[in-house]
Amino acid sequence: MNRREFILAAGAFSLAPSIAAKGSAAHSKKIDKSLAVIVSDCHICGDKKWHANDEMVKTLNQILALDPLPAKMIVMGDIAALVGLKKDYHEAKKVFTPIVDAGIEIAWMMGNHDRRDVFAEVFPEWAETSEVEGRIVHVVKMPSVDLVLLDSLDQLKNKSNHDGKINEAQIKWLEKFGASTKRPFFVCTHHDGRQMKKFAQTAIGTGNLMRGYLHGHRHSWMLDALHNWKDGGRLVRSIGMPSASLWGDIGFVTLRDKGDHAEFKIFERDCFFPSPDFRREESWDVLRKENDGAVVKVLYK
Ligand SMILES: [Fe+2]
C-alpha cells in the first residue's frame, strides 16, 4: 500500500487503530512525576471521517507504551477538527479516555480551530477552573518548573481565525504571576511568539524566571530563540511542537524536568502532507529521521 492509499484507508473503520483498552498494561506502569508529554494540533473530527482521528489514536498509543508513563499531558490547542463542533469535543473526550484511565492528568489549551464556549460545555470542570475569566488559562506544576498555559484563540463567529491574540486580562494576570512567582516557568500558547511579537516581548519582560516559550499551530518541530534587547538583553528558547495527527511533523514531545533544566525530546513518527493529489516525497522521510529523537535543553537560570 502506498502512502496515499494508506491515508485514504485510514478513514475506514475496518483499518482504524484501536486505543489501548482499559485494564491494559498502561495501568500497571509507574508514573514519573518529572515527566510530561505535549501533544498539539489534534484536529479530532466528530464524524470520524478523516485520517487525523486514527493518527491521533496511534500517537496516544505510543504515549501509553512509554515506561514509566508521564504524569501530565498538555494538549496545546486545536483539539477540534476545524470549527470547534460539539461532536468533535465529545469524540476527543472518548479518544483521550485511556490517557485519563492510565492516571495521566490532561491540561487542555485552546487553538484557532477551537471554540471555547463549546469546549466549556463538554469540559466544564476544566473551563471553570481557569485563572482568567472568559479564557482558558491554567498553571501546570512540574517538580521544579511551571508551565503557564495561555489562551491565544481570537474567536470569530463562523470561521477559523489563524491569527492569535492574548487579551488584556491575560497579560495583566501573567505580569502579576511573573512578579510573584519564585519558580522558573515556560509560557505556552497555541500560536507562536513570532506571530504575536508584542505579546512575546511582554512575556519575556515578566522577568528572569520566564525561561522558555512553547507553541503549536505550525505543525513543525521548530527550534528558535526570542530576543529581548532591553534590560541587558535576554534570549529565550522557543520550541514549536509537531501535530499529533493532521499534517506536517507528526508525533509528540516529552518534557523531562531535571531540576535545573528541562529536556524536550521529540518522538516523530511520520511527516506527511495529505491532499487529493497526495504524492509522497523522499524529503519527508529525511526530515522525519532528522527530527526524531532530537533533544533540546532549556536551563532554568
Ligand atoms: Fe492552529
Image (cartoon, rainbow, N blue to C red):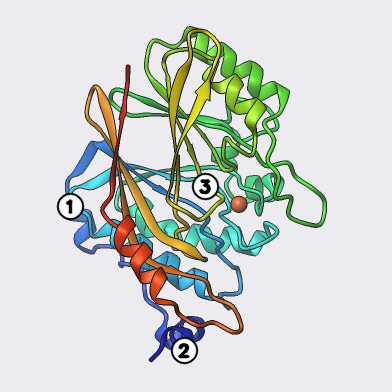
Which residue shows up at 57% across the image and 19% down it?
174
Q: Which mark is residue 25?
A: none
Which residue shows up at 66% across the image and 26% down it?
198
Q: Residues within 10 Å of mark 2 (few under 14, many from 20)?
A: few
| Spatial CA span between label 2 and label 3 | 28 Å
Question: Which secondary structure, mark 3?
Answer: loop
Extreme bottom residue here? 1
**Tag 3: amino acid:** Gly
Extreme right residue here? 157
Asked whether mark 3 lies closer than 8 Å to ligand 1, one says: yes
| Residue linked to disc 3 | 216
User: Which label's residue is closer to the chain start, 3 or 1?
Assistant: 1
Q: Position of residue 128 (x, y in %)?
A: 60, 34
Relative placement, left or right, of 200 versus 184 is right
| Spatial CA span between label 2 and label 1 | 33 Å
Which residue shows up at 59% across the image and 42% down it?
191
Numbered disc in front, either 3 or 1: 3
Relative placement, left or right, of 259 versus 108 is left
Q: In the depicted view, which residue is nearer to us: 4 or 77? A: 4
Numbered disc in front, either 2 or 1: 2
- Quarter the N terminus occupies: bottom left
Relative placement, left or right, of 106 versus 21 is right
Q: In the depicted view, which residue is nearer to us: 23 or 115? A: 115
Which residue shows up at 35% across the image and 70% down it?
285
| Residue linked to disc 2 | 5
Question: Which secondary structure, mark 2?
Answer: helix
Question: Which secondary structure, mark 1?
Answer: loop
* Number of residue marks: 3
| Residue linked to disc 1 | 67
**Tag 2: amino acid:** Glu
